[in-house]
Image: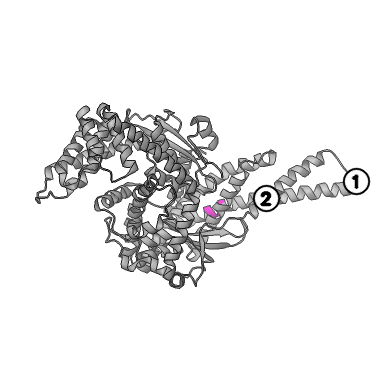
Amino acid sequence: MDRAEFIHLVRLSEHASADDSKAYRRSVAAFAALGYAWVVGCLLLSAGLLMWVANAMLHGRFKGVFIGLILAAGGLLWTSLRALWCRFDEPEGVVLQASDAPALFEALERIRKKIKGPPIHRVFLDADFNASIRQHPRFGLFGGGVNYLSIGLPLLMALDRPRFLAVLAHEYGHLRGDHGRFAAWIYRTRLSWAMLNHGLRDDEGPVAAATQAFLRWYFPRFSARTFALARQDEYEADRISGKLLGRDIAAAALTEIAVKGDWITREFWSEHWSIASAQALPVGPYAAMRPLLGLAPPGDFARESLRQALRRISDVDDTHPGLRDRLEALQAATSLPAWSSASRSAMDLLGAGGAKWIAHFDKQWCRDNASDWKQHHAYLGRVRARAAELTAGEKRNNAEEMVELGHLQRRLDVRADVRRHYERALQLTPGHPGALRGLVQCLPPMERTLRLNCLGQLFEESVANRWWACRMAVPEMEKPAADGSFDEKSLALWRERLKQAEEAERRAWEELTGTPFFEAIGRHDLGNFEMGEVQAQLARYKPVARAWLVRKNLKEFAHRRCYLVFVELPGLDDEERYVLCREMEHSLDLPGQALVLWAGYSPTLAEIERNAFDAVYVRTVT
């Protein structure tokens, strides 16, 4: 199934759900039953064939065709049993007992009683900025579910207690009542089909081919038909969270998670990995992360992060709605909240064991990232050598080399004073886009006029950078000048420019995401140092087995550098892949806009290997 057909089926399911919710749920149950019928039918067919052949042989009749029937029926029986009793790995993390965090388990029990939900069988603490409840099938397609709650240590650091409890209430809301049981059953069924599809993809033989053909037809259609149900379930879980803790608290938690999660991805990790420049051995991040997450994010960053989060539409790649849609459903304001107070941190739910778990995950992180840290330390050594080479020939450097020098020194130290390099580049080549962008990022707040002049020049000189210039200029213009003056006319001009630039960006993004993936592509154009940084960043994403990078040529911005990144992510389900790909789009240090896609149904791994040239990253198994 191609993407257009999948989207069409999703839209049909959304319309069916809106027109008649009960009829839609019945249709979903019927289509799920079709999958069960296929498995049971295969099981009965294979068992019947084996019994018939065995009976014939016991009565002295033997034919050569019986050998083929035994092999085919045996393969079909084995495949059916795998579907019925496939087993799932438990979530990663440390299992928490009630004695480890009594306050946390007491809070969970209070939420369970209010929601009248089923018990949580196991609670895990992990290192993700997230919380999730998963219901795994006990025995595959048949049998009840086992409920696992995963709680991320960074999320506990970032939120106060009421907002974190709102997150727990949202997660528990997925299991509430009859609707929750139906949605959980569909979720378990999706997991089982996904696991069976993944497990059979490399099998060979006629039985495997027939099974794979059925799964290729059935599984994407099942996912599309159940999409509206999963999307509704998210809204219902938000409603329950708002009912238990208050809509304002639930909405504030959603907004704070969006902004602080963006800060971790875009700011914290790059700064933490830059420590490898001076430290050959890995340094644990979580002890440093805790006090920073307890602070309010920088104002400009928070406003821009929220603006971008509110612009993201609810698409078909993820059953979670966009932030704006979730806030509007809660009838809450789409503005920055008062930030969580460190004095009421959710970390208190872990009791005295909070420091123990920080030390545990720091040690684990250092162990897991020792090899990648060593490689990054070596890479930064090469960056330092290149920077030293450019510094030695500074008087002979052209504008591009001066901009490169500034970028390299900022990679070594995000607080490095590189302003003079960009100013020198502008002396050599007035209006150089890279130098203007670099200089804007270096200027202190008191040089507001110069910053706005540079942004205006960048807007005029570079069509490809207009959106970036507007995004930087509008927040700057929205703040009064040091003397209290406010230039409404200039602000109106920049807002109009931003509106036009965003429209152009929307068209470009639609072209990037809407055209066939392998149309109008070419080999990537990254230099050695650019590729070295991208490979170092890819190494930090443990699920990535291989990655491909191609340049996408857009009609909207013919001279802009835009990229497609294809990643192979074995061992993750599609929702986990979606989250990881969106995170990578924000964090990968590419010199242009990028769309990150995983190998799945569209595009398939075979299509990527055939069309995306050579892999730029292959994880080394040690």
Q: What residue is shown with label 2?
A: 80
Q: How many marks?
A: 2
Mark 1, Cα crowd under 10 Å, few <14 / some 14-19 / many 20+, is few
Looking at the picture, does residue 139 appear above or below residue 613?
below
Amino acid, disc 2: Ser
Residue 343's spot in the image, x, y percent?
31, 68
Q: Residue furthest front?
A: 392
Q: Is residue 126 among the parts visible in the rendering?
A: no
Q: Please, what secondary structure does the residue beneath circle 2 have? A: helix
Q: Which image quadrant is residue 470 in? A: top left
Magenta extent = 27-31
User: In this orientation, which residue lies closer to the viewer: 262 or 347?
Assistant: 347
Q: Verify whether residue 58 appears in magenta.
A: no
471 relative to 520 in the view: left or right: left
Picture coordinates of residue 438, whole percent (x, y):
26, 38
Q: Which mark is residue 88?
A: none
Task: Check disc 1 and report the residue beneath it.
Answer: 60
Q: Horizontal placement of 333 versus 316: left or right?
A: left
- Badge 1 amino acid: Gly
For disc 2, the neighbor class at 10 Å (few under 14, some 14 to 19, many from 20) is many
- Asked whether 537 or 506 is in front, the reply is 537
What type of secondary structure mainly makes up the magenta span? Answer: helix
Element type where label 1 sits in the image: loop
Q: Earlier in the sequence, mark 2 or mark 1?
A: 1
In this rendering, is residue 535 above or below 150?
A: above
Compute the Cα span from label 2 to label 1: 29 Å
Q: How is the image coloured?
A: one colour
Q: Residue furthest right?
A: 60
Location of residue 447 in the rendering, given as x and y in whole percent from the top left corner: 16, 44
Q: Nearer the viewer, mark 2 or mark 1?
A: 2
Which quadrant of the figure contains the C terminus? Answer: top right
Q: Position of residue 109 (x, y in %)?
A: 46, 72
